[in-house]
Amino acid sequence: MSNSKAIKNRIKSVKNTKKITKAMELVSASKMKRAVASTLASRLYAEYSWEILTSIAKNTEDIKHPLFNEREKKDNKKNILFILITSNRGLCGAYNAQIIKKAILLLKLDEENINIDFMAIGKKGDTAMRRVGKNIIASFTDLPDNISISNILPISKLAIDEYSAFHYDKVLVAYTDFISALTQKPNIKQILPISKSSLKEFLNDVAGGRKETEDKTNIEQKTDYLFEGNQDELIGSLAEKITRMQIYQMLLESNASEQSSRMVAMKNASEASGEMIDDLTLVFNKARQANITREISEISAGMASVS
C-alpha cells in the first residue's frame, strides 16, 4: 500500500510540474511572437545599412575616422573586446550553451597573440566567463524583454569609446541569429573597425576549422560616393549610428532566439511530463491490482482454513 501511495504522490508532483512548464511555454510563445515581429521589422534595414557602410569603407579613400582604421598589433599582441550576448535565465534548451561554446573556442584560438576582454550581456555569459577566469569590463543584466534602441546606448557608447581610445584593436559580438522557431544559429561578427576586408577566415577557424568555399572571383563594381559638407564628420556620425543599429539588431535576434528556444524546451518538457504521467499511472494501476489480488488471496485462504 505504501508503494502505491508513493507512486500517487509522484504522479501528483509530475502533474504540478507539467502545469508550470505548460504555463512557461505559453508565456514564451507570447514573448516570442513580439520578439520575432520586432526582429523581422528591423532586419532588412540593419542588413542594408551595414552593406552601405562597408561599401563606403571599400570605395572611399583616405577615411580618417578611427572606426574605419585597422590597428597594428601592440607588442605583437592583439587586444579584442568581445561582446557576449546570452540570457539572464535558463530553461531555454541549448541557447546559452551554443554561444558560450563558440566564445570558448575563440579563447583557445591563439592565447599567446590575442588578449580578449569581455563585455557580458546576460547573467549566463557573465557567469561562464568569470568561471574560466576572463576579464569582464562591463556586465549588463537588466535589459527589458521589449528592448528599444535607447536601452542599448550605454553598450554601444562603451564599445565605441573603448575602441576610439585605442584600448582595443577589434570589437567582436557573439550573438544568436534567429532563423525559425526550431532553428537558431550562434554567430560571431566584427563591428569595429568597419573594415574593407572581413574577418571571415578568422571566424571560420573559431567556428571549428570550417572554411567557406564561396567563390567570389567576380569583379566588384566600384561605387563613387559624393559627400556634401565635412566628409569625416558625416562618415563618423553615420558609422556610430549604424554600429549602434547593428548591436541593437543582434540583441533583437538573440532575444527572439532565446524565447523560441525556451518555448520549444518547455513544450518538450510538457510532453515528457505527460508521458511520465502515463507511465506512472500504468505502474500505479498494476500495483493497485496486485494489492487487490493479494487481499482476495488472503480472504480466500482464510475462508478455506475456517471451513
Image (cartoon, rainbow, N blue to C red):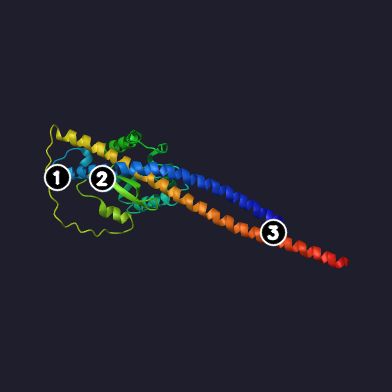
Q: Which residue is mark 3?
A: 288
Instruction: Please give left or right for residue 208 compared with residue 130 in the image.
Output: left
Instruction: Please give left or right for residue 63 compared with residue 206 in the image.
Output: left
User: How far across and how far down the image is residue 260, in percent?
Assistant: 41, 48
Q: Nearer the viewer, mark 3 or mark 1?
A: 3
Which disc is residue 84 wearing? Answer: none
Tag 1: amino acid? Asn
SS at circle 3: helix
Mark 1 nearby-residue class (10 Å; few <14, some 14–19, many ≥20): some
Q: Which residue is mark 2?
A: 47
Tag 3: amino acid? Arg
Q: Which residue is mark 1?
A: 59
Q: Nearer the viewer, mark 3 or mark 2?
A: 3
Quote the CA–CA distance across marks 3 and 1.
80 Å
Residue 273 appearing in the image: yes
Quote the CA–CA distance across marks 1 and 2.
18 Å
Tag 2: amino acid? Glu
Q: Tell which of 202 and 152 is nearer to you.
A: 152
Q: Could you tell me which residue is drawn at 38 percent across and 47 percent down?
A: 257
